[in-house]
Structure formats: structure tokens, C-alpha cells
Image: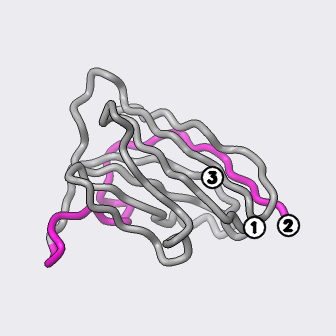
Amino acid sequence: QVKLVESGGGSVQTGGSLRLSCAAPSHTAKFKCMAWFRQGPSNEREGVASIYSGGRTIYEDSVRGRSLIFHEDDQITVILQLNSLKPDDTATYYCAAGESIRHSTGGYFCTLTAADYMHWGQGTQVTVSS
């Protein structure tokens, strides 16, 4: 198990932005897949966004168009930029990494299924007030 370290959570008002960061240990190779999940009051872990090492990204419907996932230049840090935040975005956000990829007509991609990820961070809290 590789320990991932998240940072960047916090409390904002509706419409605000947050930038979440996830870092893998520097001695690890670049993962094929990194993703962000969140767990809110329903206690279900929901996929938010994923990024394949080749660059293809996938977003959950409720965040598409107002979120961006990307690699930092070091290629072992992944950023999730959350914009136009809503109270429904309130949750604990978890970073995940793994090697399970899928293929479609658009090329390889990483899923938003928690079972496809082997390594997890401890979570960072995001709270959005109205």
C-alpha cells in the first residue's frame, strides 16, 4: 500500500473555489490512474474525477464543467480544482491511485469505481456553506 497525502480542503461559501492536492511518495513510479472520490452525509463513496497517465480525464456529471483534474509537472502530484462550489459538494474528499485502466473509442481511461483503486489517502474535508 502506498500512502497518498491530500491537502487543500477547507470551508468556503457557495460559489467559491478550492484546490485539492494529492501527492504520492517521491520514490514511487507514476500511477496509470489517479482519481478523487468523495463521501458525504449518505456515506457512499462517489467518484468525482479521474486522470489517466496519458492525460485522458473523466468527470462525474455533477462536477463536469466546473472542475478540473490535472497532473503537476512532477507527474506524481494530482490537482483537483473545484469551482462554483455548492452545498451539495460538502464531503470528505479522498485521493486514490491504481493501475486498472479501461479502453473505449476515445482511448484508455480510468474509471470512477472505487474498487479499481488500490491506494488511498486519508481524506480532506470540504465544507460549502450557503
The magenta segment: 104-130
Q: Quadrant of residue 127?
A: bottom right
Report the Cα–Cα distance between label 2 and label 3. 18 Å
User: Of the residues under marks 2 and 3, which one precedes in the sequence?
Assistant: 3
Residue 88 in percent (x, y) is at: 70, 70
**What color scheme is it?**
one colour
Q: Quadrant of residue 66?
A: bottom right
Q: Nearer the viewer, residue 65 or 87?
A: 65
Report the Cα–Cα distance between label 3 and label 1. 13 Å
Q: Nearer the viewer, residue 77 or 111?
A: 77
Q: Secondary structure at mark 1?
A: helix
* Residue identified by numbered label 2: 130
Q: In the image, what residue occupies the spot 73% across and 57% down?
A: 16
Report the Cα–Cα distance between label 2 and label 1. 6 Å
Check disc 3 and give the amino acid type: Thr
Residue 21 seen anywhere in this rendered image of the structure: yes
| 97 falls in the magenta region | no
Q: Secondary structure at mark 2?
A: loop
Please give left or right for residue 80 compared with residue 3 in the image. Answer: right
Q: Is residue 76 above or below residue 123?
A: above
